[in-house]
Amino acid sequence: MRVLSLLIMMIVFSVFALRQVSAQPLSRAERKFIVRRMAQAPTPIPQPEKASEPVPLSPLVLNEEMEKIFSKMTLAQKVGQLFLIGFMGKTGDHSIVDLIGKVKPGGLILFSRNIHSAPQVVQLVTESQRAAMKASSVPLLVGIDQEGGNVIRIKTSLPLPSALAFGEAGETKLVETAGFATGQLLKVLGINMNFAPVLDIADPDKPSFIGTRTYGSDPQLVSQMGVSFSEGMKQAGVLPTGKHFPGHGGIEEDSHKGTPEKNLTLEEMEASDLVPFVAMKNKFGDSWAVMLGHLAYPKVDPSGIPATYSKLIVKGLLRDKLGFNGLIVTDDIEMGGASAIKDVRERALRAVEAGTDMIMIAWNKKLQRELVVALQKAVKSGRIPMSRIDESVKRILIAKQNVAQLRPKPPSKDELRLALRNPKFIEIAERAMTARFERPAVKQELSFKEYANGRSLLLFSSNPRFTENFKKAISGRSVRSYPLDPERPDLIDRAMRANPKAAGVFFVSGPQAAKILNKISEDVAKRLLVVSVETQGRLKNVASFGYFADVYYRHPSLGKMIADHYFNEPKEPRVPAASPSKRETSHDRNEPVEAPAYPEQEP
């Protein structure tokens, strides 16, 4: 390990020295390499073993209390444990209590539709747990998607940066702190499972459905970031869930709408997509969960069925080859990507037969009850052995004995306030942005700054906060702002041509803004500073821009940061603190996952 570190340092300084001699700016790839290798690093992660080397499964051992509960469970109670259900509403009223009583689920998933305030969430979880204890004598796993970036359910003092912003910063200790602060927040609310981190590997410069939810394209970097975020959550007593096995990165198609195919061989996946999952296994053993992706991998399973139903992938690859004997959950089986099997009841049965432990069904209350009945019938008919159900129930109970302890009394107002307004969230946000603006300037960036020096500015943005903060921060020059209108994409060309001496700033605050930007003319593009929280993969003409500033994070003070960094006289570098946005993203599993966490008032 010491030899490898010295070798990396020699390479880094060699690249830097050569560039200094030639007086050429560092390329984007070289800059990223240096930032990542020079970043602060925690205890090294054990080097992953090759996924093709079989690892024996560890035994499923329940503690005395859980063993006693397991021995008394009925078939209905055991089958119910295999379901992770969603529901409508924000209160633990009769409908949710009745649903828990009938389904006897092993877990709940909370969406934005279930969340109004911290005390309300605590009350909802408390009442749900009370109903679960009455139905099955065992507490619920309560899960949520609190990834950061575009996928956030619960508002905090400042929203977590996206995974890609963390990956660009390259600071694993920062990511661990983010995981711990997130875990503390969830735990105080009664949420004991987070469907994060995203372990998918994707190149932000290429089109990908995952977008900014990935830590990046380097398997080792994604491994380090995913392990660090998970370590923080585990320290707070929350179960991390790596997703989407065996890898969703690099795919343009949305698995919420259809079943994408990923045409990599097993050997290719062992060198890329599987590396972060193996790193998680090496670090945490079986004390984390895996979420399957609704994707087909025809070069791994020639049948072409999604991983959710594939014995070759779930049992053959994840269990037998990676040696993972922890909890495996599906993504929502009502999603389009799961529809390769038309009958939803059959989807549940096939997922269990493949080796999955928990089936997520997030919407349809009627289907939730029908799936439980269908699985009971499959056991009684002999299609699915009782031993197969017992195996999954034990994994679920082991997860619960680790993270699902019930609080003797609800948290105080001060505890809730501290968790939501944890100063760490502000520190994390500031450090992520500071790391972004500490990057060494490249030639194109310096050229644009020289071009824009002293010129009046035209600002194109659909985000009022960005616009307001930018205009307030600019000193010594005029700024005229234009809201974006998808019905008038020619507005940018017309405005820039009408002001031939002005420089332009275009804020890509979301997918709609990206579509408008893709329609501008090349002569206008070269006069623009494009500030983007989206990946380059959404844009067609990046090379033609005056400069492309990829920030990947909707920090509330981003407008001021851009004004200071690119247009104002240099000051003492400091990222300003800001109040959180008052609006919350809306994101559900069958809604577009690019719903932003920062208020996106696009046309």
Image (cartoon, grey):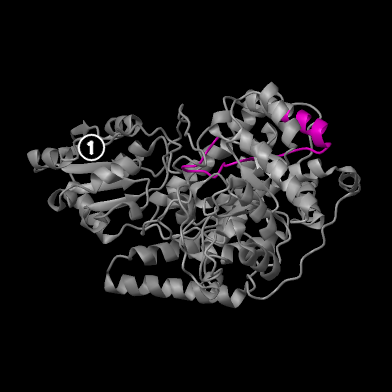
Is 523 or 111 nearer to us in this picture?
111
Residue 201, percent from left and from top: 49, 60
* Residue type pointed to by label 1: Leu
Seen at 59% across and 35% down, the residue is: 364
Residue 14, percent from left and from top: 41, 75
Is residue 318 visible in the rendered image? The answer is yes
Is 362 or 153 nearer to us in this picture?
362
Q: Vertically, is 218 above or below 401?
A: below
Quadrant where the N terminus is found in the figure: bottom right
Seen at 36% across and 56% down, the residue is: 207
Toward which corner of the image does residue 192 lie, by quadrant?
Answer: top right
The residue range painted magenta reads: 128-153
Label 1 packing within 10 angstroms: few (<14), some (14-19), many (20+): many
Is residue 456 visible in the rendered image? The answer is no
* Residue 147 part of the magenta segment: yes
Q: Left or right of 113: which side holds 386?
A: right
Q: How many marks?
A: 1
* Residue 148 part of the magenta segment: yes
Q: Left or right of 293: which side holds 560?
A: left
Toward which corner of the image does residue 574 lie, by quadrant?
Answer: top left
Q: Vertically, is 417 above or below 261?
A: above
Look at the numbered disc 1 and give the secondary structure of its residue.
strand
Q: Which residue is mark 1?
A: 459
Is 308 or 243 nearer to us in this picture?
308
